[in-house]
Each structure stands twice: as structure tokens, then as C-alpha cells.
Image: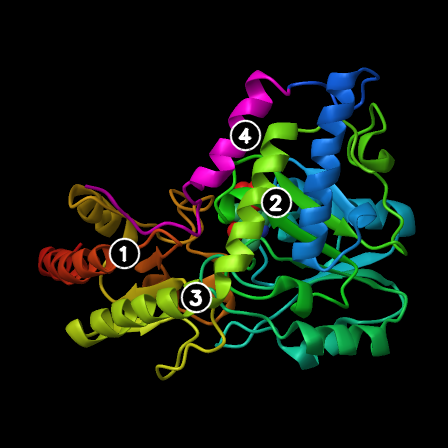
Amino acid sequence: MVHYLDNAATTPVRASAVARMVPLLTEGYGNPSGAHRMAREANRVLDDAREVMAGVLGAEPGQIVFTAGGTEADNLAVRGVLATRGGLAVCSAVEHHAVLDPVARTGGRVVPVGTDGRIDLEALEASLDGSVSLVSVMLANNETGVIQPLAEVVELVRRKAPRALIHTDAVQALSWVDVAELAADVDLISVSAHKFGGPKGTGVLVVRDRVELEPLFLGGGQERARRGGTQNVAGIAAMAVAAAETVAERPTAVPRVAALRDRLADGLRDALDGVVESGVPGRDRSHKTANICHLCFEGIESEALLFLLEQENVMASAASSCASGAIDPSHVLLAMGFDRDLAFGSLRLSLGYGTTADDVAVALAVVPVAVSRLREKGS
Ligand code: PLP
């Protein structure tokens, strides 16, 4: 039996989302841009999904732009804004590469974070001037689960660079915090269905009415000419079902998962010496999402640890899944001041709506043995 503790990489698709999706692939498969009845029905499916996603994200239906996932939503936000307004983008040093790379490539400014993983507000203030047209700060980090002080960021940007638009990458946030409330005052919001029980390759960029955006893709003028390309109707409908279920479950899921995560993180820290929990100086995890247990073990390399865990059917990851396998240590950990050796020994165990007490018990039994074995071998 597999113990899947890699929900920050992706989640299993909810049964309700699959049930919604299948008939739209086999029967309701009309092209929503067409003129006949099947096309109109497909378009109605999009309208319904747009309304649900708008409700979940605190937006108007017309502000929802369907994308092929989080990477596209992030790129559309950064590149789309810079293309219409010129100027510079500013982002935090712990952004996902889908934000960090477009910002860096366009000569933007990268703002440091503290050892707790939160953006340095003084450095952010210093980076803001009249040349800044976009500030992008994520809601929750994909490696550490650290939640950024978005309200303070918004207040600062509105005061210091009133011309700038604000984007937040909320891809890791929807299951664990109220995105609608926390991102109510930002101009652009990215989410991705496969992080909350929807299918891969489907996401949303919220684009408030005041935002002018140059599309990444030109074509049939879909999504009010903000994103050309025939929409993934079945995927989008499934995303809406998954999002609604996620938000309805959140009040019970968050305390349940947080308790499991705390048991896991505390248990591993008690069982082993030489463990550093990222962004958690004591044991206070209140500024982290409920689902992520992120630890660095002295004297080991995560690659070897992941191999041993996999042999025990525990699926985990070292950092973000996109970066694992790469030789460089995580840019997130380096930005938080970890030294390189310790950053090479990182382990992210990420829980999800399907995680059970048994999954946690198995990880608690397996991880200390694996770490000790690697330390004895001097790996
Ligand atoms: N942003 C964050 C914070 C993520 O964690 C991810 C995925 O890992 C992405 C963006 C990219 O999303 P997608 O996999 O839907 O392209």
C-alpha cells in the first residue's frame, strides 16, 4: 500500500470531479465557441464553472480566465502586465520558478526573505519606485508552506508604488486558507486545479476589471481575448467541482490535517538529532499551511533518503517536484539562509485531504530509520 505524502506536488483527483468530467468527454464534448446546441451546452458548462470559481476566489465571473494550470497563469500575470505597461516586476526570492524566471528574465527585482521565509518588508519597500508596474508575492510557499503577509504587502505597494499592480500565486493555498479573503485586494490571482483534487493542466488567473493584460496566446479570442485556445471544458468543470468541495471541507480539513502534520513534524524532530524545520524556530507553525512538514536533516542527502522511503512505499519529495533531481539545492532554502549542505538534506512530506493517521504512523516509523542508516553509512 502506498503512503502518498507528496500532495504539494499533486493530489489525487476527487471522485466527484471525475464523475463530472467523464460525461463531458464522451457526450457533452461540444466546442464552447461553436454555434449549435452542443456548443451552447458546453459554453453553459464553462459559465457555471466560471461562476463557481469566481465565488471561491472572491471575484466576478468576468474576471476568471481559464488557463492550462498554474505555470501559465503565473506567466500570463507577469508577462501580460509587463507587455501592456512596460516597467519592472518585483517578486520575493521564494517564488515558484513560474514567477521568478519571468521576473528575472525581464530584469526585475527580487526581494529577500527572512529566516522565517516571509518577505522582508523593509527590502520590499526599498525596491518600490515609479518604475515598478507589477509586484508578485505568493500566498503560500510550495516547499515550506510559509504563508506570506499579503495584507502588509498590499498596503505597502499601494502606498509606495500606487501605479503597480499586485499578483499573488495562490496555487498552494486554496485547500488551506481563504484565498477570497486574503487576496481580496490584489489585482491578479493564480490557482491550479491539480493541487486541490482537480485534474492537471487546468487553472485560473483572476484578472480584476482594472487590469489590462496582453495575452500570451493569440487565436480564437476565447476568454474575452485574454487567452486564445479552445477551453478544456471537462477539466474546467471538474476543477469547479473540486474547488467547491475543497472550500466546503476546509473548516474540518484544516484542523484535521494540521493535527496530523504536527504529529509528524514533532515526532520526527523528537526522534532524531540534527533536524531543522524550515521557518519554524520553536514549534509554532501558525504561519504555515496545515499540510506541509518540511525538515532538513544534517549529514544526509535527500536523494538517498527519498530512495529509501520509496522502498517503504512512502512517496515524498525533497523540495518542489519541479526542482527535485536538479543538482542545485532549493533556492527557497538558500533564500531563508540555510547553508548548502543542510539544504541538500531536505525532506518535504505534504499531506492532503486523503491523508490518514496510518500514513503518518508509517512515515514516523520509516523516516528515522532511513535517516539513521544514511548517517551511519556517511552518505
Ligand atoms: N506555483 C506554485 C506555488 C506551485 O506550487 C506550482 C506547482 O508546483 C505552480 C505554480 C505551477 O503550477 P502547475 O503545475 O499547474 O503548472
Disc 1: CA contacts within 10 A as few (<14), some (14-19) or many (>=20): some
Of callouts 4 and 1, which one flags the residue occurring earlier in the amino acid sequence? 4
Residue 352 visible, this orientation: yes
| Residue extent of the magenta highlight | 1-28
State the separation of the CA atoms marked 1 and 2.
27 Å
Which mark is in front, 4 or 2?
4
Q: Quadrant of residue 110?
A: bottom right
Q: Earlier in the sequence, mark 3 or mark 2?
A: 2
Mark sitting on residue 85? none
Q: Is 316 situated left or right of 25 in this image? A: left
> Label 3, label 2: how many angstroms apart (C-alpha)?
26 Å
Q: Mark 4 or mark 3: which comes first in sequence?
A: 4
Query: What is the CA distance from the residue labelled 4 to the residue labelled 1?
Result: 26 Å
Rounded to the nearest angstrom, the CA distance separating label 4 from label 3 is 26 Å
Q: Which residue is mark 2?
A: 70
With 308 as the anchor, is 294 left or right in this view? right
Q: Residue furthest bottom?
A: 282
